Amino acid sequence: MAKALLEVEKLANYINGEWAEGKEFTSVINPATGEQVVQVPLSGGKAVNEAVQAAKVAQKEWALTPAPQRAEVLYEVGRIMKERKEHLAKLLTLENGKVLEEARGEVQEGIDMAFYMAGEGRRLFGQTTNAELKDKFAMSMRAPIGVVGIITPWNFPIAIATWKSFPAIVAGNAVIWKPATETPIMAFELAKIYEEAGLPKGVINVVYGSGSTVGDAMVHHDDIRVISFTGSNETGSHIAAECGRQLKKVSLELGGKNAVIVMDDADIDLAVEGIIWSAFGTSGQRCTACSRVIVHEDVKEQLEQRLLTEMEKLTIGNGLDEDVKVGPIINDAGMEKIKKYMEIGKQEGAKLLAGGYPLTEGNLAKGNYFAPTLFSDVTGDMRIAQEEIFGPVVSLIPVKSFEEAIEVNNNVTYGLSSSIFTSDVNRVFKAQRDLDTGIVYVNAGTTGAEIHLPFGGTKGTGNGHRDSGVQALDVFTEWKAVYVDYSGKLQRAQIDVD
Ligand code: NAP
């Protein structure tokens, strides 16, 4: 399958518009089958430095290219991605494991982002305003920052890269991109698309390698002025500290412990559908995955039974099979982490209602599969209700009231996504006000963000920046205030005002 879709057996870095072959490699493994898909270079600081030098030169010209012309490249990128959607989706499933339907959705997210950000080429709005002195003009405008570094995780190998690289490029920056070593193929494909779309050489550079070598070299390179990172809290806080020491701008999108609240007046069938989709889609390996269900005690039993019935229907296996609904876990470390939380949950006194074990029957033995799992009688302070497990595991937490549901939702260190199922309009408005997360859904699960809205979270989910939406431009631009005095004399602000 891999051979039919990929024309190479080894990937190459893309630096200054050239495909640079590596010396050392590691294998990219299909988590559904355990088979090698391709080999990826393990580069080091030297490749990062070469990429930065090329990017510095390219960025000067690129910043002087009118933004509507920069945008034309993104329109073309979007057009090619659309044409290749099925091809990209299959490759994405091969490297990441997510089921084809979701892989197609992820590629679509990238296509949407291309056209949306291309539109920004004719906006990139600043403000004109009034100056406080006579015969003086004042405005604010966005300016590109220079060379920016983007570091992306394996769970959305193409969407997250488009959330970051498209706004960076339309704003006039040059990019160094380090994708996750587990999922490098989307970076290879996107670099090819950028090349075909006519992006000048050096404006995007892809450097493969581990976080501790390539990622670290990017974080510490003096000429990379911004790091935009998505990944775990552990890596994110380390990168933030390193960037802080260098006074380097850093944008972080980190983990989540997202909850669906089901009130006593909810449409239970709808809530079950929403929970199943957002908890077990991508095998729970989404930063916005539902991993807690906060349920009103009056409907707890009903919800439990309905969830168990629907969970039994989930087909688990290789995501390339169109009938499969739940794919594999990314790697052995991911499996070990999930297994560890099974023990923790049981020790804490949670009731295991379904799942709780790896699946090893037949073909499943070749890959990493974990049974969809439901814990009940969980309390909000248990570790399984507080810590990110990143697998198909849901904890049901019973509560007595709407107020308690909100409190339990907010009582975690993360603040990415939350959802409430209710038919009471007053509760809808109170919930959207009181849920302390960057994303709130009403009568829908915790996943399904659209690219023209800001994406990100409060508290431990990040550091206040947002990916996607027009807000993403704030990460990749500086605000510049411009004053033009046409009075012909020196006018002093705040002093010559009378
Ligand atoms: P990760 O282990 O933190 O890795 C993320 C990226 O950082 C990878 O490319 C990794 O490289 C690199 N990296 C590792 N150590 C580094 C270092 N010292 N310096 C620079 N870069 C370094 O996270 P992950 O396991 O791939 O991703 C899962 C996490 O991402 C989850 O916590 C999930 O919630 C979060 N996530 C958040 C969002 C959001 O928008 N909030 C979206 C998706 C995922 P290598 O892996 O190649 O070594």
Image (spheres, rainbow, N blue to C red):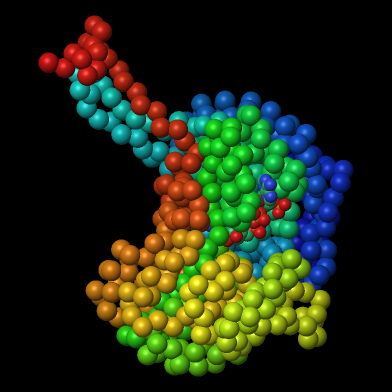
Left-right relation of 81 to 461 = right
Which image quadrant for residue 135?
Answer: top left
Where is residue 466? Give x, y as percent. 46, 50
In this view, the residue in front, 110 or 80, is 110
- Name the spot of residue 227 as percent of width and height, x first: 58, 41
Task: Tell which quarter ligand 1 is in.
Answer: bottom right
Quadrant of image for the C terminus:
top left
Q: Residue at x 24, y 17 (%)?
A: 493
- Check the image and report above or below for 32 versus 167: below
Question: In front: 332, or 124?
Answer: 332
Using the image as rendered, state which of residue 24 and residue 494 is in the foreground: 494
How many discs mark residues in the rendered view? 0
Q: In the image, 296: left or right of 23?
A: left
Q: Residue at x 20, y 15 (%)?
A: 495
Q: Is residue 447 visible?
A: no
Q: Locate residue 316: give its quadrant.
A: bottom right
| Residue at left offset 81%, top offset 48% | 41
**Residue found at x 55% / y 55%:** 254
| Residue, far top | 489
Q: Is residue 376 visible?
A: yes
Relative image position of residue 361 (x, y in whole percent): 78, 86
Residue that extends furthest to the left in the rendered view of this protein: 498
Which quarter of the image is occupied by the N terminus? bottom right
Left or right of 429 in this view: 3: right
Q: Residue 458 versus residue 201: which sits nearer the camera?
A: 458
Quadrant of the rendered structure where residue 263 is? bottom left
Q: Is residue 84 left or right of residue 450?
A: right
